Image (tube, rainbow, N blue to C red):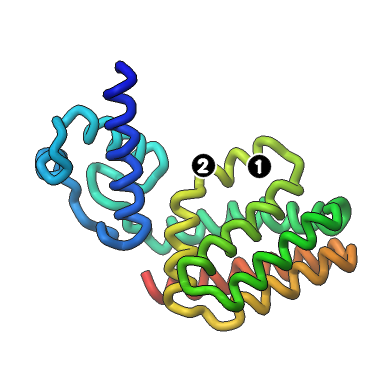
Amino acid sequence: MNRKNRTVQSKIYEIIRENIINGKYESGTKLIETKLAEEFGVSRTPVREAVQRLKQEGLIKKNVVYKPTESDLRHLFQMRILIECYAAQMAANYMVDTDIENLQHCIDIARKGDSKEIVKANKKFHDIIVRESRNPIMIDTVQKMESIIYLFSRAVVFNKRPFLIDEHQQIKQAIAERNSEKASDLMRLHLEADLEFSLDIV
């Protein structure tokens, strides 16, 4: 693929991905490559390649925008709980003060921001903690799930799950107090609450 084709493919990928994440292409929507190519004014090739990338990310399955089953959701959150509870425990033991301040900054943005800002702050909050796992396999696993996690995070925020930001504050406080057991327990309760809320809205 030459440089120009790579640029077109990347642009189409970003547009389709954003349309999925922002809800323009809803879960269960069938994406027809010929129609997308016509919509974007390109050939089918960059569309096909963009769709293939999104399939690898799990956002598209059999050319249909991913619509999770209850089982899919539970499996996703089981993995998140295993990784992020461990990461929260490690964060309480080893996180430097600058990153603890960054967690608080995410919380402050989320308390005052609009929904889009809250989603971004929520993602950054969890990303900072996941890094503290200091385990490249765990970090890579979360990154591979990133797009799907972002979908659920967006749904949780836009549907105004109660106590979401308060729970972040409690997790941050446990990390700042170097209470690893409490940080891990609070992260588990936080993600379990996200799961139950997500099950009610999908």
Instruction: For mark 1, give the secondary structure.
Output: helix
- 2 on left or right of 197: left
* Percent position of residue 184, x then y: 76, 63
Q: In the rendered view of the protein, which quadrant contains the C terminus? A: bottom left
Q: What residue is at 85 percent from the left and 65 percent from the top?
A: 176
The circle drawn on residue 144 is: 2
1 or 2: tag closer to the N-terminus: 1
User: Residue at horizontal 39%, vertical 45%?
Assistant: 58
Q: Position of residue 127 (x, y in %)?
A: 64, 52
Q: Residue at point 34% right, 34% down?
A: 10
Measured Cα–Cα span from mark 1 to mark 2: 10 Å
Q: Which residue is mark 1?
A: 138
Q: Amino acid at mark 1?
A: Met
Q: Residue at x 85, y 61 (%)?
A: 180
Q: Residues within 10 Å of mark 1 (few under 14, many from 20)?
A: many
Foreground residue, 60 or 128? 128
**In which quarter of the view is residue 35 placed?**
top left
